[in-house]
Amino acid sequence: MKMTRITAWAASATVAAAIAVPVAAAPASAAENAITFACAEPPFPSAESDFFVKIKAPLIVFKGRDIDLDVTLTSAEPTKFDLPANGINGSIDVKVGGSVQTTVTATGLTNPAIVPAGQQVALPGGAARVPASKVGIYTFRPDKFELHTFFGTTLACTPTAPTAISAITVTVLAP
């Protein structure tokens, strides 16, 4: 009986040590998804457009802390004209699944530098925070977005189909 408790304690200590090491140096979880969106930008006609969305999240977070998301939106098609730095800004919704079901909005998307005609438009800087309120797995999927242009127009886009998971975070109890 005593040996069983010692063996169980040793196994628990080994598992705790294995978990503790990755938490200290947890890499990020991220995938770039190609998504077709139905977009509207009045006064122009509505159309479908393809974008790449990358959501970056920490792989492991302690319960009670925050999961910081970093989102980048990139056009699949190149721009037809030069864009000034910060000529586009906006936000994108991120659906959270798994241990909690919610939606957060990543704000701060912008093109930090001039984008010459003929190049894809990358909009990094999207940031959102999700409280890690429960132990378990959190999944992150891109959803609708809205962009404001230096022309004074607003581009609103919604995915044409359910999107794939872009990032996963595991929330564990703090030691």
Image (tube, rainbow, N blue to C red):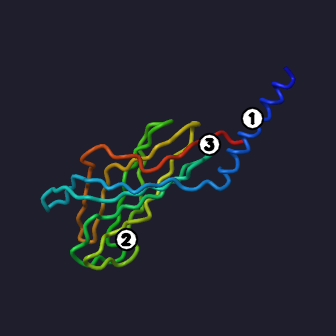
Q: Which residue is at a point 63% across and 44% down the rendered structure image? A: 62
Q: Amino acid at mark 2?
A: Asn
Q: Earlier in the sequence, mark 3 or mark 1?
A: 1
Which residue in the structure is indicated by mark 1? 12
Instruction: Tell me if residue 122 comes above or below residue 12 in the rendering.
Output: below
Q: Amino acid at mark 3?
A: Gly
What SS does tag 3 mark? Answer: loop
Which of 126/60 is in front?
60
Which of 34/62 is in front?
34
**For discs 1 and 2, the disc positioned in front in the rendered view:** 1
Tell me which corner region of the image, top left, top right, bottom left or bottom right, holds residue 71: bottom left
Which residue in the structure is indicated by mark 2? 111
Q: Position of residue 106 (x, y in %)?
A: 42, 55
Q: Earlier in the sequence, mark 2 or mark 3?
A: 3
Tell me which corner region of the image, top left, top right, bottom left or bottom right, holds residue 156: bottom left
What SS does tag 1 mark? Answer: helix
> In this rendering, would 163 be left or right of 98?
left
> In this rendering, would 160 be left or right of 140?
left
Query: Tag on residue 163?
Result: none
Viewport quadrant of the N terminus: top right
What SS does tag 2 mark? Answer: loop
Query: Tag on residue 64?
Result: 3
